[in-house]
Amino acid sequence: MLFSKTPKRDYFNPSNTHKPWFRERQHLPKHRNHTLFILVSILCFLLGVVVSPLSHAESGELIMQGEDGGATPAFLHSTDVDLQVNGMIAHVTYSQTFINNSDEWKHGVYTFPLNENAAINSMEMLIGDRVIRGKIKRKTEAKKAFDEAKKAGKRASLTQQQRPNLFTQHLANIAPGEKITVTLQYIQQVNYDNGEFSFHLPTTLTPRYIPGIPVKNLSDTAFSSHAHTSDSVAINHKLLSTYNESPRKSNTGKESHTVKHSDETKNESEQEPQHLSHDSERLSDSNTFISGWALPTNEVRDADKITPFMLPNQFASSTNQLSFSATIHAGVPLDSINSSSHQLNWHAIENAQYQYRAWIDSKHVTMDKDVWLHWRPSSNATPQAAYFAENIDSDHYALVMLTPPQVNPDDLQDFPRDVTFIIDTSGSMGGRPIEDAKAALKLAVGRLDSKDRFNIVAFNSNYTKLFSQPTNTKPHNIKTALSFISGLHANGGTEMAAALNEALNAQPKENYVKQVVFITDGAVGNETALFSLIQQKLGSARLFTVGIGSAPNSYFMTRAAQFGRGSYVFIDNQNNIQKEMQRLFTKLESPVLSNLSLTLPKNMRHSNKVEVYPKRLPDLYASEPLLINLKASDLASVAYGDGNDKNEQTADNSLILSGTLTDKHGNIHQWQRSIQAQYSLDEHNNNASDYPANAKPSHSTQNKGIATAWARKKIAALMDEKALGRDEEEVKNEIVNVAIPHNLITAYTSFVAIEEVVSRPQSSNVQSRNIMNLMPQGTQMRAVSYPKTSAGITFYLAIGVISLIVLLLFHSKELQRFLLKHYRMLKKAERVTQHV
């Protein structure tokens, strides 16, 4: 359309000379074919861009199929869990059995979840009847020892922590048909809330969203040579289908990348991806093994280590099976033991007072949803305070539970609330999770009081606010909100930061209590950055989290609530929504028990070697106990003097929690809860409990694990300091100094077990295989998006340019005629002008 219309002025000559030129132009042939040619050429240029990975990111359809395809996986995996509960401490024996279901030597990598409070303090490898006990080492030292054993042909296992709730098991040199069992033992504090004890065992994970920009170009990985097939990516013949969300951007607004990658041969401190070599469509050895589906980014440096490949649920019958049993030494009579996730059997153990046995109904169950175990004491035996202790050498460790007094919320001051609900609508919420999240949100909105204000923020790759600012709860606003919730669908990335920032920045009305309720599965890899954001933006608000799905990221959910000075609940199935949301409503609608202070016993008070966690006491809500982990060095038994003043002696030996609450008339009331410290670890009297008068106190025969629980809490506190900006090297040194004596796996220490004899002949071929997790029950299997990347863009743009040049040359004769005619036309116009 070069001159489709008569110009209003002549761009070449004065206005009084343009008419002859236009008269000449009217006799020229139309050049619509040239216009079409130019458009086609431009489209061909764009085609060069379209066929690049850039465009694939927008369509988000890249399928990764597993090496074993529809056949039985090369590694069969099962887990046996034996739980022993003593008071507030759970001792867990966690045995993973791996069978090499092939006729070749194999290495294996299995990334698996545990509870974020799990303190792994023992590891051993069982091969036949031979037991090789693991040793705790610094992470780099353990990795080096494992790699050397692997290369030498020795059987070995390496257990590493990637997140407080995510670990990796590496196996080396497993013979054809051979079975190896790796047994971990760990300590975990039992939860207690609203008169009920609970234990949480994750069995699989929801694939995590990885924001940020890759630290290396995609073209620098072997994956790029396979990434552009039309339907699938063939690596090691096939790889099982996995998951990610599409499209997505980092928290800085830049596109992120999702590819398969490995740095198996690098030290743990190195995160740069390396080139991969291929041999007949196979990865030759562990040196080129791809450990996860995501490429490390500037925001998630270990993305490849926290994105294990996933099995679709149709493989559930052949692998990833769980057996679970528990023995509960409650110390008090129990009314019930149940599981919200699985069918459970239980009974009291004969001739053993207050001891119970529970087990999952089926001998083996599929590892596609977390196990939740709950037990409730009889109503007249509900503990109000408890003190559990353990002495190691000259150190005294204690776990103390203190529950605030029961109060009637109607008697307390009731402030109006300014509530912002954040709901996750990302791709990982697809299937049942988004429906459960919507149902929970509708319950919460319907529960709002007439004096409250509210807003809703829905997010995936971007966020949307229901109202421009918090609004009142008049019927038409509630109706609008319910309609908005009904229209939500799961799709896209999990960009939490922008939604959190929006909700936390909203200014509450004067004299309103600001609350943020965050409903999500927590499936993100940049937890640390989000914790920092919450800490910086929280102000006077309180953040509450609602975990959704069969396998939520409980580490993110619990720690986000901790940083947000709020609380959390988990909804693992649709039958549990009403119960868990009611627990949340109780806390949302109850005033905070504030101004908490902890008074230590006299001989601890004057010691500079007492360490108490949490360092900063959190806010408490109705029926929510405070759990305190403490360590006191070089403590002697309390001296009671001459015994004349028994009340003074008791006070000197009391650990006291005190605080205030405000009634509905604005009057402030003081309250406190106390318990006697127990320094003597007599086998038959090593803990004290404050129960109702008609309930017998519990007496445990041992309290092993209290020291380990304290060490885990200290390590968690140090990692929180790192998240808030403390120098990593300082944090690392302090953590190692705690972890090595307590034999604990951390971000900087690992367990390694090596059989000293060489098993695999050097002439034998060996291949690495991922041992995959099952997709969580109710979660949709999705294609992995191939996000926008700068990797290889020059090459693909060059294709577009070349295609344009080729087309121009193809039509060169016609182009020459076209240009020549216009050249003659212009020259003729010049002569006419000169003649005039």
Image (cartoon, rainbow, N blue to C red):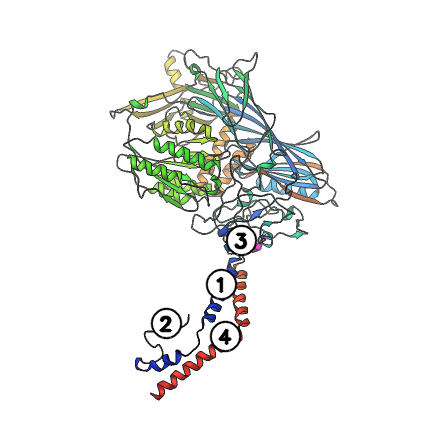
Mark 3 neighbour class, 10 Å CA radius: few under 14, some 14 to 19, many 20 or more = some
Label 3 is placed on what type of residue? Lys
Q: Position of residue 739 (x, y in %)?
A: 54, 34
Q: Decide: marks 4, 1 in contact (CB < 8 A)?
A: no
Task: Tell me, yes or no, if residue 725 can be seen here.
Answer: no
- Range of residues picked out in magenta: 209-221
Query: Which SS class for mark 3?
Result: loop
Pick the residue in front: 105 or 807. 807
Q: Which residue is mark 4?
A: 815
Q: Earlier in the sequence, mark 3 or mark 1?
A: 1
Return the disc, 2 or 4, that comes first in the chain's sequence: 2
The reply to whether the C-beta atoms of the residues labelled 2 and 1 are less than 8 Å apart is no
Main SS class of the magenta portion in the image = loop
Mark whose residue sits in front, 2 or 1:
2
For mark 1, what is the residue?
43
Q: Quick check: can you spot residue 402?
A: yes
State the residue position of label 3. Answer: 216
Q: Amino acid at mark 4?
A: Leu
Which numbered disc, 3 or 4, marks the residue that appears first in the sequence?
3
**Label 3, label 4: how far apart the Cα atoms are:** 43 Å
Residue of label 2: 5
Question: In the rendered view, does 132 fall on the left or right side of 557?
Answer: right
Q: Secondary structure at mark 2?
A: loop
The secondary element bearing badge 1 is classed as helix
